Amino acid sequence: MAYIILAEDEIHIQRLAKVVLEKGGHTIQTVSSGEELLKCLETVTSLPDLMILDIMMPGIDGLQVLRTLKAQPKYAGIPVVMLTALAQEAIVLKGIQLGAKDYIRKPFHPVDLLDRINRQLPQPVSKAEGS
């Protein structure tokens, strides 16, 4: 269905999210840091349909990555969902202000993760609607 890049430094969370999303029909590419995500975007042959960013990662954190992505026209239109254990309202608000489409709190329920990611994906226009 969709090509998604997941930036998450906790390997067990990364693996769980990848399995859940792949079972949902998506192609998942994982990276472990903000720097790795930005480098990955420079080399991909096609842009992702959505990105999932952990906030607390080594080096460049998820909010800094989000700010960088939204400042570049090439990436600005790609939906971004934040995945975080942080629950402070100010951090959630900051991410939304920077352009995040949703926040998913860790620990997450697999069904909730898949449902919320699917809701943020661009919906294809049916032939009947497009005619």
Image (cartoon, rainbow, N blue to C red):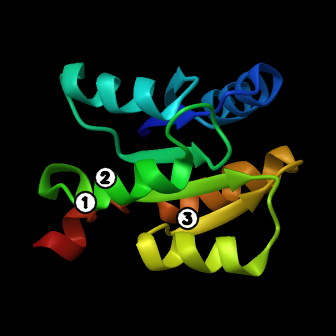
Q: Does 41 sit left or right of 20 as displayed?
A: left
Q: Amino acid at mark 3?
A: Arg
Q: Residue at x 68, y 57 (%)?
A: 115
Q: Residue at x 67, y 27 (%)?
A: 9
Q: Amino acid at mark 1?
A: Ala
Give the residue at mark 3: 119
Place of residue 11 in the rendered image (x, y in percent of width and height, measured from the top left) = 75, 20
- Looking at the rendered image, the disc whose residue lies closer to the viewer, 2 or 3, is 2
Residue 69's disc is 2
Place of residue 46 in the rendered image (x, y in percent of width and height, measured from the top left) = 21, 30
- Which of 105 and 114 lies nearest the eye of the viewer? 105
Q: Residue at x 89, y 48 (%)?
A: 107
- Which of 84 and 19 lies nearest the eye of the viewer? 84
Q: Are marks 1 and 2 in contact (CB under 8 Å)?
A: yes
| Mark 2 residue element | helix
Q: Are marks 2 and 3 in contact (CB under 8 Å)?
A: no
Q: Does 67 sit left or right of 15 as displayed?
A: left
Q: Does 85 sit left or right of 30 as displayed?
A: right
Q: Amino acid at mark 2?
A: Leu
Give the residue at mark 1: 76
Q: Which of the marked residues, 2 or 3, is nearer the chain's N terminus?
A: 2
